[in-house]
Amino acid sequence: MELTRDEEKGLDGEYGEALASSYRILVAIGEATGAKKLVPVEWAHISGVNYNTIGDSGMQFLEKFSNTARVAVRTTINPMGYDKTKPEGIPPAFQERQQSIARSYERMGATPSFTCTPYEVFDLPQKGTAVSFAESNAAVFSNSLLGLMTNKESALSALASSVTGTAPLSDLRLEDARGPKVAIETEFDFTNELDYGVLGYFAGKAVKDNCVSLDNISRLDTMQAKALCAGMGTSGSCGMFTFGGKVKEKISFGKKEAQSVMDELSTTDDADIITLGSPQLGMNELDLLAKITENKKFTRRCMIFCSRAIYTEAIKIGLAGKIEKSGAEFRCDSCTCLTPYVTKDRYDAAITNSVKGAYYLSRSNNVKVSLKDIRAIAEEYTQ
């Protein structure tokens, strides 16, 4: 790779070990992906925030790294494991370790956003801007719908980009890689957000390229788009989709393929808790939820995960209060994925409308999952 003189100094340790290690990470990735150089990024979004994700080794690394590392560009961070204003049932040891991780990121200068939907919370850069997003749904959403340019970063690569302000010029940061070679042909009409999440999960598993075309789909609302991006980000390496375009290969996605995904991820018919928010719910989903639960009460415990920023806005306009009248409980700064609120010793199964949530609830939390769309959940579990 061709590095500038300043980048070479950083790599050689002249600006400290934190910057040197960050450059080593980016150069190694760049060489592995055929990048000729590093390019500036305007925004880094880091995963690896939840203690359940990175554990003691990640926590200890961040404690040491943050002693000298400082972010060079706007840096936001993914949800942590719990809402510190509602710690009920969360072991004190987990809380202590989680807060250590949060302090490390804040010490570096990161914004304590604790959101997996930064595109709903922060002002967006212009189309064509290079960013470094480690949250998979945010990477797919930003590439496909916002015109930003990011690879599906790891927690470490996005962390390195936050400190150097650069990223390798490779894969989806190159225009040539942003054209699909394969199309998914949908063969039935979609009726809800779960259909789009299932499509995304199927596409992520079926297509190994950087980009895929989705045929017979031309417009998405926000909830559908988030479900699609989260599903795609969960199951594979594909980091972008387009609507149509010339391709070399087509793959069919019909009711048989959709049912195959449902059979994999939906493993029970009922459960004792409902979890909504993977990705975290935004204002559009909260508005819908308020309407479909108006004058009704949930018959199961219902947890709604959203960012603190979204919850604050929902309080201001009275939306949060309307939803809370249904008995639903908000959890901010956290999400369904790897949540310590839903554990095997408390619940045998969970109900969710999220394909991504179902994947992690099953594999990481070891609970069964009942996948239903949000309207079906409201109809079946409120009265």
Image (tube, rainbow, N blue to C red):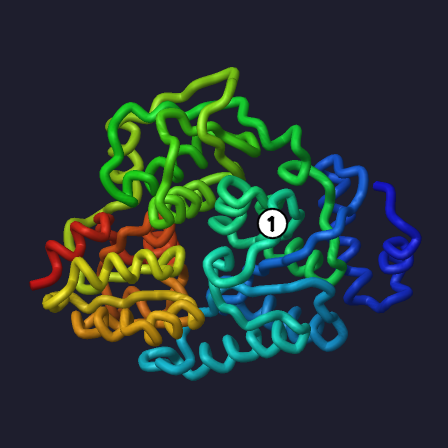
Report the residue at 89% width, 50% height from top.
4
Which residue lies most toward the left here? 383
The quadrant in which the C terminus is found is bottom left
Q: Nearer the viewer, residue 293 or 64?
A: 293
Left or right: 287 in relation to 59:
left
- Whether residue 90 is situated above or below residue 284 in the rendered picture: below
- Between 73 and 55, the residue placed more toward the observer is 73
Left or right of 115: which side holds 17? right
Q: Is residue 333 visible?
A: no
Q: Position of residue 84 (x, y in %)?
A: 42, 80
Task: Identify the image quadrant of residue 341.
Answer: bottom left
Res. 149 image quadrant: top right
Q: Residue furthest front?
A: 317
- Screen quadrant of the N terminus: top right
Residue 303: where, in percent of width, then height? 27, 67
Which three-letter amino acid code belongs to the residue tagged 1?
Answer: Glu
- Residue sitting at x 30%, y 40%: 264
Labels in figure, total: 1
**Residue 121: where, in percent of width, then height?**
48, 63
- Dot 1 lies on which element? loop
Q: Is residue 218 visible?
A: yes
- Residue at image position (79%, 55%) is 23
Residue 214 vs 65, above or below: the answer is above
Residue 206: x %, y % from top left: 44, 29
Which residue position holds label 1? 153
Residue occupying the point 25% across, 70% down: 346
Q: Is residue 303 left or right of residue 20?
A: left
